[in-house]
Image: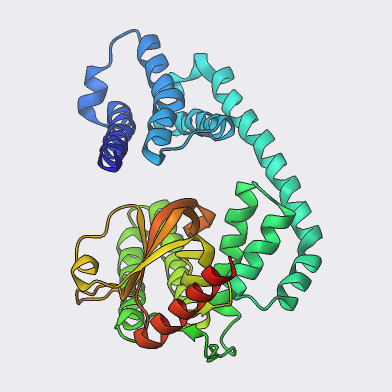
Amino acid sequence: MVLHKKTVSLVALFLLLLVISSNYVLYHSSFGLQSLPADLTGVIVGSILDLSLVAPLLFLAWQRKFSVKYFVVLMATGLIAARFVIPSEYLASFQSVMWLGVGIEGVLILFELSLLFMLVKNVPPILKRVKSSSLPLLFSFSRAMNEKFPKQTFIHILCSEMLMFYYAFGMWKKKPSDEANTFTLYKRSSFVTFQIMIIHAIVIETLGLHWLLHNTSIILSVVLLILNIYSIIFFIGDIQALRLNPLQVEDDRIYISFGLAKRMEISFKDIEEIVEDTHILQHKIPNTTIEFIARDFEKVYPDLLLTLKSPIEATLFMGIKKKYQQVAIRVDDPHAFKKIVKERLKKNKQNM
């Protein structure tokens, strides 16, 4: 079933790219322009439907989720994209439809700005709540935001970006926790070194590509420059978040995160069993398993696998939520970690 869903998702992505690229080629290549009929009305209508209806549906199928609000946003985005894909001289008879997309996006932007105003208004009490919490910052901040703004996707994405910039620029003086119940995830690997190498590669690529493209396409060079700067900030923030948020074992639960990419809160009462069998751990991990493993050039395996009684939600990049049935974990002190997890699990089962 999981394989079938993954196949459908990949097919949807392929068709999405095909729809967008074919419409672009149709109006921006000599072959496409030669193929256009004398009466362009039907072709233009077809392209508008492709970009505002077919492409959004394929995108939702690729992401495997659907909501009316999300669909409306994608439709409006498709109509705006059509203004750039289809030459303006062909759109003279369809200006009202194009402006509809702009109008919908404008309303949505005003709505998101109102949410942003509410966020700014609530920042002081949120920060006060975070400072008074004993939880790792990634979890205390997320919990405070969920209490104030439940089910507000835009706010959660914005807060994810705020955390990235905060870790990248505001956490250099802070030292990692060295408490007995905390465990780092990256010291047995060259993961951080690998991330630093990627940052260096992006810097070199940015300088080279920006210089090459500046005289050819200023817009493309600026876009790539912005994306590369964002990537560098993300990797720096990710390294800092990984260093400063070790796995934390409390009396009733585990708080585990891997940089900014993923985090999860696991209650001991939700754990079905702990798998330590080397033969099982070295097999291919299924898609229903989330990994908290620092990987570099060497092939590594988890120290243990937590099988859950029912799927538990994890928070991924940009605040995306997804549920998992198993949790694969690799820490720098596996013996101490296994010991404390078993003790806490046994204690919680006795108290139930």
Q: Is residue 316 left or right of residue 333?
A: right
Q: Position of residue 246 (x, y in %)?
A: 49, 80
Q: Position of residue 123 (x, y in %)?
A: 76, 64
State the colouring used for the structure image: rainbow
Q: Nearer the viewer, residue 284 or 78?
A: 284
Q: Position of residue 74 (x, y in %)?
A: 50, 33
* In the rendered image, the vertical position of residue 110 relative to residue 295, given as above or below: above
Q: Quadrant of the N terminus?
A: top left
The residue at the point 32 percent across, 83 percent down is 193
Q: Is residue 41 left or right of residue 77?
A: left
The residue at the point 59 percent across, 76 percent down is 136
Q: Is residue 191 left or right of residue 255?
A: left
* In the rendered image, the vertical position of residue 50 relative to residue 344, given as above or below: above
The residue at the point 62 percent across, 49 percent down is 154
Q: Quadrant of the C terminus?
A: bottom right
Q: Residue furthest front?
A: 350
* In the rendered image, the vertical position of residue 236 relative to residue 70, given as above or below: below
The residue at the point 38 percent across, 21 percent down is 47
Give the total of numbered labels: 0
Q: Is residue 332 visible?
A: no
Q: Quadrant of residue 30?
A: top left
Q: Position of residue 232 (x, y in %)?
A: 43, 71
